[in-house]
Image (tube, rainbow, N blue to C red):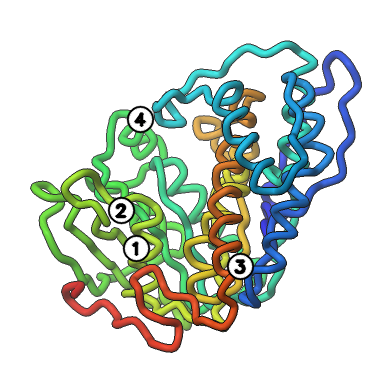
Amino acid sequence: MCLNTATAHKAATPPQIGPAMPEFEPVRLPHYDGQGPHSLLADVAAWTGSEPMHRLLALFGGRLPGTGTAEDLAYLEAFSADHWDFRAGRERHETAPQPLAPEHEHAAIHAALALGLGAQARPRLSHYTQVLVLGGLVASCVFRTRFAAELLDSGIGADNVTGVGGFRPLDGPDLESAALSGLDCGGYEVDAIEASLKRAFNIGGEPRIDEGGDPQRDPGRSWKVATYQVGPVTVRAVAAPSSQPGRRRADTVDTCRFWADRVVDLAPGDSVLVVTSSPYTAFQHCDAITHMGLPYGCTIDTVGVDPAELPEPHFRKRHTASGYLQEVRSAIRSMCRLYHTAYAAAQTPMRPVESAAGRRLTQRPRRVNRRPH
């Protein structure tokens, strides 16, 4: 179940300009409590065939085939590639807003919000065994870790808080954000998430460091876990080795699998609260179920802080209509992965689902000590 933002970060309402805004009932994102894949198939089907999706497609001349969820998702993936892919291989922050007709702009924003890209609610549970803060640009590291700390201050319980990053070198915009926020964040994304965690949770002292490899010479094979103890809560910053070290640095999936398998021993009965930014909640929630919920049998919830409502003017950013359409496409692609993973799991209900590292759930993965095996 994907929820978004606590009361400290109320989602912004798009301005009412031009024709009256379309009204949509919010569509629930897939809900997963570790109880098997069958309900996920129904949830994905309901999201795919929802009124906001039908209206959004019609606005751009599309129509679902209606011959089954798999066929509808395949159509949506192809249609969104033709009409809503504005990145063309670029990073999100490198993609300029695209002009749309006013009626398209207003309807796109409202449909996207109804599809789960901006719902307003507190986390569903009062306690989680794991809070997982997704990294990114320095600004994202700063306000997502702060949001996680605010949630715990407001009464949400947690045993562990982890910020995940990577050995992506910080570039000009990152360093500018660090300077504006007064954050001493080293040279890599994982350093930024660690510095942000220390600030958000008022952490002093030195961490226990487990690490391997040389991030300057071979970032694809390098890893790091920095561990702090804040009262009863364990706080970590994690960077993982890549699953394709000769081709690229670790991506989010690599990092989450490493974290789940080698750092926290994720297992059935665990509950994970993923913290991100509100426009990305839909796709990152689905990815979290695909790569953590289903393989490890744990509960997955996702919350997002709204960048349009940040207290810092230099970090504040209102998502554009074309940006929302891009993230609807991201959600469609993640829904495809989730649907096919859940469908495959549903075909063999008597077999234990294997973890991402190939270990069965009846076995406990080895924890990180000094070097991954």
Left or right, residue 114 beside residue 355:
right
Please name which of the two marks, 4 or 3, marks the residue nearer to the observer: 4
Residue 163 position by quadrant: bottom left
Label 2: state its secondary structure.
Answer: helix
Upstream in the sequence, badge 1 or badge 3?
3
Q: Which mark is residue 173?
A: 4
Q: Amino acid at mark 2?
A: Val
Taking the spot 86% from the left edge, 38% from the top edge, the residue there is 24
Q: Amino acid at mark 1?
A: Ala
Please name which of the two marks, 1 or 3, marks the residue nearer to the observer: 1
Instruction: Kindly identify which residue carries mark 3.
Output: 153
Upstream in the sequence, badge 4 or badge 3?
3
Q: Amino acid at mark 3?
A: Asp
Upstream in the sequence, badge 2 or badge 4?
4
264 or 161: nearer the viewer: 264
Circle 2: is it few (<14), some (14-19), or many (20+) Cα within 10 Å? many
Instruction: Kindly identify which residue carries mark 1.
Output: 237
Marks 3 and 2, Cα distance to the nearest angstrom? Answer: 24 Å
Upstream in the sequence, badge 3 or badge 2?
3
Rendered view: 87 above or below 236? above
Q: Which mark is residue 190?
A: 2
Upstream in the sequence, badge 1 or badge 4?
4
Marks 1 and 4, Cα distance to the nearest angstrom? Answer: 22 Å
Taking the spot 65% from the left edge, 77% from the top edge, the residue there is 35
Taking the spot 73% from the left edge, 43% from the top edge, the residue there is 115
Label 1: state its secondary structure.
Answer: strand
In x, y percent, where is residue 83?
A: 61, 21
In x, y percent, where is residue 149?
A: 54, 62
